[in-house]
Amino acid sequence: MNGKTGQYEIGDRRDADEPVTSVEPPVAGQRRSRSRWGLLLVLLAGLICRGGLITQPGFEDDTSLFRDWASNLATYPLSEYFDQTSSCNYPPLYLLVLKGIGHLEGFAAAQYDIGIDREALLDALIRIPSCLADLFIALLLFFEGRRIASSRCGVVAAALYFLNPVSIYNSAYWGQVDAVHSAFLLGALVATNRMRPAWTGIALGLALMTKLQSIAFAPLFLFDVYRWQRWRGVGVLMLGLLTAAVCISAPFAFSGSLSTALQRGYVDVIGQYERLSINAFNPWYLTGTPHAPDANVPPPLVALAAKGQDSVADDASPWLRLTWRRISQLVYVTLVAVILSLYASRPGIASRALCAGLLGLAFFLALTEMHERYAHPVFALLPLWAIGNSWRERGYVAMSFLALLNVIYVMHPEHLGSGIAVIFTLLFVILLAGMAGRPRKSTCPAPRPPALLAEPAPPRSSLVGAFRVATLLALLVWLIGAGLFAYQATTRGLAIPQSHEHRIYLSDLEPLVARMGYRTQRRDGSIDGGVIHLGNRFYLRGLGTHAASITEYKIPPGWNRFRAVVGIDRHYQGQARVSIDLDGQRIYDSPTLRSDSDPIDIDLPIGGATTIRLVSHSLGPKRGDHIDWALARFVHSDSESLLGDTNDAVNPDDFDASVVSQEGIQWSIPPKEPSLHD
């Protein structure tokens, strides 16, 4: 800074809160001209990259769904559409976009000989809204970056997103819609920077009408508008949001399909994929069982409640109410409170962008059932923070690289998942710590006088102060809960029953044969990794299989009975039956098993036999035939009592040995993972 004139020279650094007292130097116009050329080059490069990918097939499971939805929307009126398309579960705005695409494709095919396959044309048209949203995001980042910092920083902000492989892959190759609601969220952020709550509400409403996941960013906008304009501002924001929602919902309301559209787009999608992680490399991926049901209880809590027993009723302890999903929701709510509390002490546009990015990362990292793409809005919001200095830009690039690896997980680089989950989590912690620390100086060249770069602190609010105190109390509750769990785990122990001289669990033995119709056999858990849950009990020992399956074991000498509790895991749907062979001869065939029926207690004599074969048969669609052989074990006669008090020991003479042999089982390729299009 020039001490005589009070002007900033090119390359000078200054704090965000340090006022600028004079206009730009004379060379600012030339610098702005070069920045415009830089922006044009960024946009041209990004458009070329997207143009080269827009006709590619991408992820066929999703693009085929979007094609069907667009075609049916163009064929049927909205009043009949949902009766014809049962799989459609997107909010109204994107359905209107697909309807326009369907009509455009039909018009082009009818009027012009375009010389390409209609499916390929529809695939390309489906990608255009996302690519246009990418372009809008880049332009908005440029203009806002230029306003709050400099033209050069605006170009950098646009390039960080528009040339980001994550945005190119997601919009142009995959054909997903994430860029559209990300564009609206960025618009809401820019409107909040300018303290225009009506436009914030309209943009947020459009985002929510495109993708439900946009709700993760609503706390920031409500929090900020309240801090600056109190309840009047919140009311204006909500009015803008409702205005956008009503306008978008009007066609569905007039056609009588609004309730169905809202039910499918906002209600049915919650808990649609009951798993810890849907291809998202986040902390839940580190459990080693990302496909386990998130409605299940973590194994350590089940072991704690069981108190050394091999099973426990699912209502026996308060610990058993803490499912993976509930724990994730508690963690997420706490993180949101912590982020907003830290942000409350650091006003400013860069801090607001960082807060938005942290909220998006908290949504992606803390909650279960996350898809690999749900972190996408973060990369549209963080550039306004990243342009502050070089280390932020490097952090943004590193995060983009990790997100890219996560997105291409659909191509199965599974061995990278744990490493990415660790680094992603560490970056989030570092960003969170950065918000708690002292702000660093900006390295952007000094711009013309920035009206909002040095944003003043908002008026003090007793409600915000109470919120920060409540957040601190919530953290104390977490610490107390963790301490209580650690104390009980230490005093009671988390040990589970082991094989001994009176019983041998099959999960402690190596099978001679273990063939599954889906995944691989799981020891002491369901085949997807959760705790075995049959009826109203959790079981800590057993085998998890999937119909159809064959599992064969050698019977240790001297053991003369086989016992187990068999059924379909409670967290899945399906129907199947099981059979048991001794030395190749069928001795047991079960009735039909269903997830909503009671499991079956099995107690069979096996004296003199050398091998036992456990067979499961699918009786319908294979999805959900998760057969659990809970407490499957060899015992000596009368060495332990049969679990349960309603079934007597099974007499093998009561069963027909002429049922279908194992060779009659129809084996198939393991079913493909479900389409994860939402």
Image (tube, grey):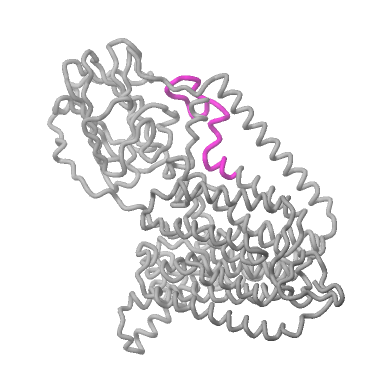
Q: Is residue 518 left or right of residue 17?
A: left
Residue 177 position (above or below residue 284): below
Can I make out residue 589 in this image?
Answer: no
**Residue 206 image position (x, y, % from top left):** 60, 69
Q: Is residue 666 left or right of residue 137?
A: left
Q: Residue furthest left?
A: 658
| Number of numbered discs overlaid on the protein picture | 0
**Residue 47 image position (x, y, % from top left):** 48, 78
**Residue 285 image position (x, y, % from top left):** 47, 45
Residue nearer the viewer, 46 or 41: 41
Residue nearer the viewer, 414 or 82: 414
Residue nearer the viewer, 141 or 550: 141
Can I make out residue 17 in this image?
Answer: yes
Q: Residue at x 33, y 74 (%)?
A: 119
Identify the magenta region.
Answer: 305-329
Q: Residue at x 81, y 76 (%)?
A: 7
Residue nearer the viewer, 583 or 256: 583
Q: Residue at x 44, y 49 (%)?
A: 417
Residue 400 position (above or below residue 512): below
